[in-house]
Image (spheres, grey):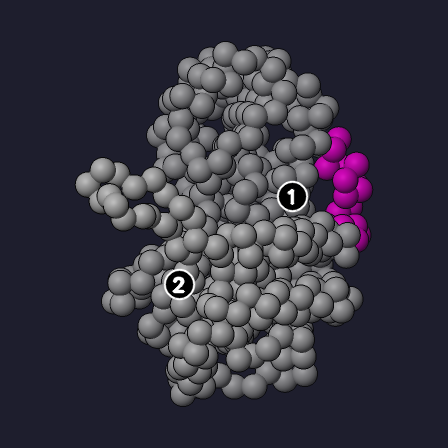
Amino acid sequence: MELPPQSEEIIELAVQELRQQYSTGATRNDLNLRETLLHQLETLLIQGQQLLEGALLKDLHKHSTEYYLTEMTGILSEIQYQRRNFRKWAQPQWQFTNLLNLPGSSYVHPEPFGVVCIIGSWNFPVYLLLMPLVGAISSGNCTLLRLPDDDTCTHTVKALVHLFAKYVDTRYVRVIHGGIEETKIVLQQKFDLILGTGSETLGRIVSRAAAEHLTPVILELGGKSPCVVDETAEIELTARRIVWGAFLNAGQLCLRPDYVLVDKRIGDQLVDAIIQQINQFFGLDPLESDSYGRVIHKRSFDRLAAILKQDAKFVIHGGKLDAEKLYISPTLLNFKGDLLEFQRSSAMEKELFGPILPIFYYDTFEQVFTLIQSRPKSLTMALFSSDKDRQRALLSNTSRCREFRLG
C-alpha cells in the first residue's frame, strides 16, 4: 500500500476541519460520542493486532509477545479505565467558597482543550501515539496525530494509516504522515495543546513552534538515566532486570538504564551475571534470536557504531555489527574504576538509545551522588539496594523525573 502525499494544503485543511468539528460542540457535549470513539480505537487495536505485529516485526524486529506487552496491553487497559470513569470526570466538581465570594457558589467545570496535536515516536510507534489519544478522546478533544517519520517505521505507519481510515471516525481524529517538512507544516498550525514524545531536539522544535501561538505543550523527552547497584543487591535478579530494561527493543527506550554505577566490591560479579543473562535472554548469537530487536535506520546504526569504535578498548561483551541488517549485539563497556575514562567516553556524552551499556565501579556511595548530580536531570533512575537509608539518601540527594527502587 502506497501512502497518499501530504501537502501543505492537505494538512491545513485537516486542522481546519477538526476545528470546525470541535466548534459544533459534539465532542464537548455528547459523552456518548466519546464512548463510541473509544470503542472504535479499541476495535482498531484488536482487529489490527496481526497487521501491526507484522509491521513492527519488519520495522524493528519486534517479537509479537513484546508488541503485546509493551504496545497493546497498556492502551487497552487505559481505554477500559477511561470508559469506566470519564463520565464522572466530566461532571462539575463543587469547591469550597471563601467568605469574600459568599453567597456565591464555586465549581470546577472540566472542559476539553479543543484541537490537540499528538506527535508520536518510532521506537514505540503504537503505544506513544495511541496512549495519549485515549485521554484526548475521553476528555472531548478533536485530535491530529502526527505519525512517526516515513523513513523510520515505514510498515507500521502504513498499517496505522489504513487502520484509522477503516475503524475511526475521521471527523474527530486525523492522521498525518511524512518527514521533517510535513512536521514543520503541522507545527505551523494553531493547536490548543501539543503532546510530543522524542529527543531533546524535538522538544526544542515543538516548544519554539508552540510559543508562536502561545500553545501549551506536554513533552516526554529522553535523558541519560542511571542504574545504581550497591553491595546489598541480589546479583542474579538485579542482572536479569538490568538486561531486560537495557536491551528491550535493542535499547531504543527512553526509560532504559543508560549506564550502571555499581559498588566496586561486587562489580565483577554483576558484570559476569549480566553476561549470563544476556546469553539466557538472547542466546549465544543474538542475531539469530527472534526476540532481539534491530536499530531503526542507518543513521542511528552509524552513530552507535562510531561510539563503539571510539570506546572499543572497553568492550568486554558484544560489539558485533551488521550494517546490512541494522544489527548491533548487546554490548557492555566496562570502565571499572577509571573515572576519567568513564566521564570522557563517547558513550557518556549523551543518551545512547541503543544496545550499549557503560558500567563504572564506584568507591563510596557518596561518589554516586556526585556522579549523578554532575549530569542533567535524567528521565528515570533505578536503585538496586535493600538498604532503606541509602534509598532515602539517594532520593534526597539527586533529582529525576521517575525513580524505581528495587531491593
- Local packing at callout 1 (Cα closer than 10 Å; few below 14, some 14-19, many 20+) is many
**Span highlighted in magenta in the image:** 276-292
Q: Is residue 237 above or below residue 141?
A: above
In primary-sequence order, the first of circles 2 and 1 is 2
Check the picture and name the quadrant holding the N terminus: bottom right
271 displayed left or right of 405: right
Name the spot of residue 212 as percent of width and height, x first: 25, 67
- Towards the viewer: 151 or 324: 151
Q: Is residue 103 above or below residue 75?
A: above
Name the spot of residue 355 as percent of width and height, x first: 61, 45
Q: Which mark is residue 113?
A: 2
Quadrant for residue 278, please give it.
top right
Quick check: is 403 in the magenta stretch?
A: no
Mark 2: amino acid: Phe
Name the spot of residue 266 as percent of width and height, x first: 62, 16
* Residue at image coords 40%, 74%: 186
Residue 397 visible in the displayed image: yes
277 displayed left or right of 201: right
Q: Secondary structure at mark 1?
A: helix
Q: Which mark is residue 221?
A: none
Name the spot of residue 319 as percent of width and height, x first: 63, 44
Depth check, mark 2 against mark 1: the one in front is 2
Furthest residue in direction front, as rendered:
103
